[in-house]
Every structure is written in structure tokens, then in C-alpha cells.
Image (cartoon, rainbow, N blue to C red):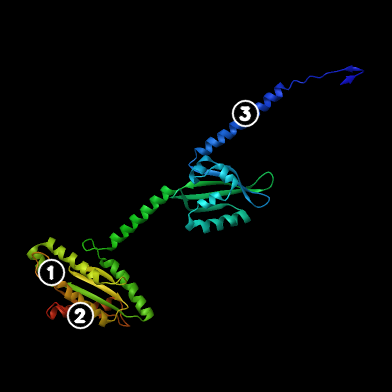
Amino acid sequence: MEVDGTLVVSLIDRTAERRLEAEREAWRQLQDNLALTLTDNMPAGSYVLHRQVDGRPHFDFLSRRLLAMLGLEREAVIADPMLPCRCVHPDDAAGFLDAARRIFTAGGPFGWQGRLLVAGQIRWVRIEAEPRLRPDGLPAWDGMVTDISEQQRIEEELRIANGNLEKLAATDALTGTWNRLHFEQRLEDEIARAHRYGEPLSLLLLDIDHFKAINDRHGHQLGDRVLVEISRRLARQMRDTDLLARWGGEEFVAVLPHTSARAAGALAERIRGLIPTLSLPGVGAVTISVGVAQLQPDDDLNSLFQRVDRALYGAKEGGRDRVVQA
């Protein structure tokens, strides 16, 4: 620059400015590294997604933990933002995509729980995302993907354990058939259904003849074996819709939905003929007596049982090893 014909040169020392800019860049890198360290050590994977002006998704951030969870490379996801969606289990994909499209179009928070299929392995995850607006006004979501596979495994084990406990509470410990309490509850339901739809329903009450003599002569251990073997033979003659229970002691009871007294009597005769073929060392031929009763329009549980019990009493009074219908 010239001043009154004199060339004036200004020297500006930018050392401090450059040093300040370098410190700012170092601070930004430290923050970025700290953010990466924090996200990589979190138990969940994290991401930041925004909707571009043209409506397409774009990932602004993907944590290393999330990429490892999905088995994907960062560059591949940036190039194809739909790639993570293809990790969703085929059976869960439709529901996931519907939820994602709805939120991506209308906004709002996102929540979904389901399965991923990564390298042939199923992984249960929970995905949550909160919406916000970026400084440029575009909608964005800050999300977390949590692996809940272990939680699902524990819950499934608990469901199985609870189911086993419920079954134990409803079954006879010796024979594995339903116990009396469970049978009565189910029978009331079957009676109500038969009355409602006007369908036939029959009941069998079976008693092992001279069972006390078997216990007295051979001991309770062998008597228990007789009960178990007879319950197995009875169960093999039942349909899936039938219900067999140990009524008490040496008595068994079976409810036969959609079955007339005639058909129930034929089944009872077939069962009665099978029991003497039971072969247990030290025990002679075992026989049973059977009472049969069909549900009548004015029957409830008590009256139906009174009639089938009278039929069983008639079979035993008539000489045992026989079937009597009410």
C-alpha cells in the first residue's frame, strides 16, 4: 500500500489465530472420539437418521456396536440406507417396514421389538427412536438398538417352567392323567358347550375290580404299576377331544364330547376287553367295571355323575367285568 508515495508494508502475525483454530479442531476431534468411545461402550447400538429433502433416508451416525450387531460395514449402509432393514427376520419384516414407513412419513417416536437374522443367527432386539428437527429444518431421529436375546431366552424359559408347573398342578402324579380338580373344571365347560349347541356328550366311570386285593396280596408298589399300565391303555383309546382323569384310588373317568351313549358303550366294551390282556408278573388277569351315561337336557355336573355312578354300581353288583349304561 502506498502512502504519500511511500510503499507501506503491513505484517500480520496469524500464529495465534492458527494456533486457536488448531486447538478448536483438536477439541472437536476429542469430542468426536469421546462420543464414539461412549457409544461403543454402551450396551446398545446407536444411530442418527434423517429424512432428506427428496424424502430418502440418510444415516448421519452409526455406532460401531450397531454395525457389529448388524454385521454390516459403515460405507455399505451409507450407500444403501435400506440395508439394515434387510437384517430383519423375514417373518417380522412386514410389520417392521409398516411401522418404519408410518413414522418416517408422519413423524413421531418409533418403537419396535422383533428378530434380526444375521449370519444365520436369530437375535432379538428392541429399537427405539426419538424425533427432532435438525438446524436445517429436516426431521431426524436419534435411535437405540438394544439386544434383548438373553431377556427373551429367560422369558421363554419362564413361560415353559410356568406351563410345566400348571400342568403338574392339573395332573395326577402317578399316572400322568388329569387330576380330579382339573377334570371337574373342564367337564363343566364341556357340559355348557354341549347344552349350548345341542350336541351329545357321554361320561365313562371305570373301576378296577378287586384292586384292594391286588394291593393286599402284592403290595402297593405293584398296585401302582397296575394303575399306570391301565391308565396308558385307557389313554391310547381316547381321541384328542376326549378327557381322561384319575378320579380317585382305582377309579378313572373319561368325558367324550360329541359322543352318544351307544358309541360310548361300544368304546367301553372295547376297553373292557383290552384290560384282561394286561400282563404283569405275579398279577393274574385284571378286569374293570364301567358305567356309561349320556348327558340329558336337564343334567348338570352333579346329576350326570350321579347317573354314571349308579351305572358303575350296577356293573359291580352285576358281577363286575362288565359295562352298564345309565
Q: Residue at x 27, y 63 (%)?
A: 171
As shown in the figure, which amino acid type bears the numbered disc 3? Ala
Quarter holding the N terminus is: top right
User: Where residue 311 is drawn, which disc sits there?
Assistant: 2
Please name which of the two marks, 3 or 2, marks the residue nearer to the observer.
3
Assess whether mark 2 and mark 1 are in contact (beta carbons under 8 angstroms).
no
Q: CA distance from mark 1 to mark 2?
A: 19 Å
Q: Which one is in front, 184 or 70?
A: 70
Q: Secondary structure at mark 2?
A: helix
In this view, 4 is above or below 293: above
Q: Name which of mark 1 and mark 2 comes first in the sequence.
A: 1
Please name which of the two marks, 1 or 3, marks the residue nearer to the observer.
3
Residue 30 image-quadrant placement: top right
Q: CA distance from mark 1 to mark 3?
A: 92 Å
Q: Secondary structure at mark 3?
A: helix
Structural crowding at the residue carrying mark 3, measured as other residues with C-alpha within 10 Å and reported as few (<14), some (14–19) or many (≥20) = few
Residue topped by disc 1: 211
**Residue 312's x, y, as percent?**
19, 77
**Residue 141's x, y, as percent?**
60, 48
